[in-house]
Amino acid sequence: MKEISCKLLVIGAGPGGYVCAIRAGQLGVDTVIVEAGKPGGTCLNVGCIPSKALIHAAEEFEKIAHMASGKDPLGIKVAAPTLELAKTVAWKDGIVSRLNSGVAGLLKKARVKTVQGWATFRDGKTVEVETEIGTQVIRAETVVIATGSAPVELPFLPFGGPVISSTEALALGDVPKKLAVVGGGYIGLELGMAFARMGSKVTVVEALPRVLAQYDAELTRPVLKRLGELGVEVMTGAKAKGLSTKGDALLVETADGKSAKVAADKILVTVGRKPLTEGWGLEQIDLDRTGKFIRIDDQCRSSMRGIFAIGDVTGEPMLAHRAMAQGEMVAEIVAGHKRSWDKRAIPAICFTDPELVTAGLSPEEAKALAGEIKIGQFPFAANGRAMTRQGEDGFVRVVARADNHLVLGIQAVGQGVSELSAAFGLALEMGARLEDIAGTIHAHPTQGEGFQEAALKALGHVLHV
Ligand code: FAD
């Protein structure tokens, strides 16, 4: 049995863990990272990157199919396209593999030692890793738990056969003719819409009264319209109950209590993700929890001295960029810098068609905080750039305090608005007032002008509507 000691041990090389290890290494901290799978974690291997690759392929395919149908007004004539999903998946795998090597290279450059294998806690500062060359014991002064999350499995719809999680959905060999999606959150709708654009007949089964329930109804309206155009059936207030005996349909209890069958080749279950806190000895260490998540303070310290936790394992929002920001902060704390969590906004994006972005507070949250608020909303139907890219559906909305015009929240729905999230985050982080956004020259013609116009509208002198 081999034993090594280090100053910092990071468990899990997802976006939280690998960023933490790289930054710690850059700061001269003697760091070891343990990863059971491939570098990059859920995000790079079976999450953010592969899903966006598939969404891009679906978008391209649908665009060409629309042109081929003769219904597209651009005057481009093409033959009807075909799609070999296995090739799309191979292309996606190539991107993932390049990025895997990139992360491994960055860890090496930062002089971080990587140990490949499953880590099990012996005690709070010691783990055992089963590696290809035998058991390795690692002792550390400080430990960062960055073990991420896994898809929630429904006991009456266990994964296997036609029932798949997002992980399998990203590696299918063929486009399913009929796809049932259980759970209308962002992962279910991103993937469900992508398959609908590739030709699947998609049915979404959601127990709540509406899909994308975390967003306000006005924001999701363009997405619902698009789901209708794609022929996606959305069953709300409906409960998935199990798999038919033949395994070719999802059994559902509809909103009015009736039993229904949704014919499906594949049933994609996306009902949430659970933190990975079990099965590797963490139970023996008495860390405080908030529900299933590891409880942390504003420096990501757990209840046990010398043990930090970051990323999905610590709770919502379970997003890669939150994990990365926490990882970077913790590395600096370990290196002796004075840091604590002081972020004003964690932008969240839903890569549906059209895309949704939220940053900071919703109008309701802002009202609850500030009392009186100002809201400015600008439609992409009045934005030249949106018109030229056939993306007129959607808007940008800016929410600010009525007294001093401090911007509290920004929301947008529209084609390509994910790229505006950086500007939204910056405005909130810098404590922008409506006048700062309105007074910034936004290049023409861009959808960013919609952001400026929304701020102008809140100030009462919008120019282009
Ligand atoms: P993870 O990325 O889950 O990494 C944890 C790592 O720890 C894993 O590699 C795991 O193998 C390893 N590990 C766990 N236990 C052990 C152990 N005992 N020993 C050794 N290794 C261990 N987020 C976004 O911000 N944008 C998106 O567009 C987005 N899209 C998504 C799409 C899908 C389909 C899914 C599933 C998720 C998506 N997410 C997205 C969420 C994002 O992937 C997660 O928030 C992010 O990966 C969390 O990072 P993490 O570092 O906390 O954990």
Image (spheres, helix red, strand yellow):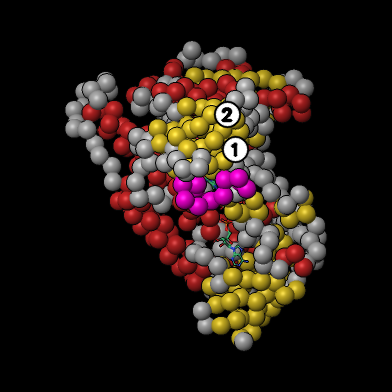
Residue at (74% x, 20% y) in the render: 372
Which mark is first along the chain, 2 or 1? 1
Return the residue found at the far front: 245
How many other residues sit within 10 Å of disc 2, few (<14), some (14-19) or many (≥20)? some
Residue 25: image location, x then y, percent: 58, 69
Residue at (72% x, 28% y) in the render: 365
Residue 136: image location, x then y, percent: 61, 81
Residue 90 in which image quadrant = bottom left
How many other residues sit within 10 Å of disc 1, few (<14), some (14-19) or many (≥20)? some
Identify the residue position indicated by label 1 in the image: 241
- Mark 2 element type: strand
Residue at (71% x, 27% y) in the render: 366
Residue 263 in which image quadrant = top left
Q: Nearer the viewer, residue 116 or 465?
A: 116
In the image, taking residue 188 as reference, residue 10 lies left or right, namely: right
Query: What amino acid type is highlighted by mark number 1?
Result: Lys
Q: Nearer the viewer, residue 137 or 144?
A: 137
Residue 397 shown in magenta = no
Name the quarter showing ligand 1: bottom right
Residue 419: image location, x then y, percent: 47, 38
Residue stretch in magenta: 154-164
Identify the residue position indicated by label 2 in the image: 259
Q: Is residue 226 visible?
A: no
Query: What amino acid type is highlighted by mark number 2?
Result: Ser
Q: Nearer the viewer, residue 66 or 114?
A: 66
When the figure is inspected, residue 35 is found, relative to residue 189, above or below; the finding is below
Say which mark, if any, is on residue 360.
none
Per the model, the C-alpha gap separating discs 1 and 2 is: 9 Å
Residue at (57% x, 28% y) in the render: 259
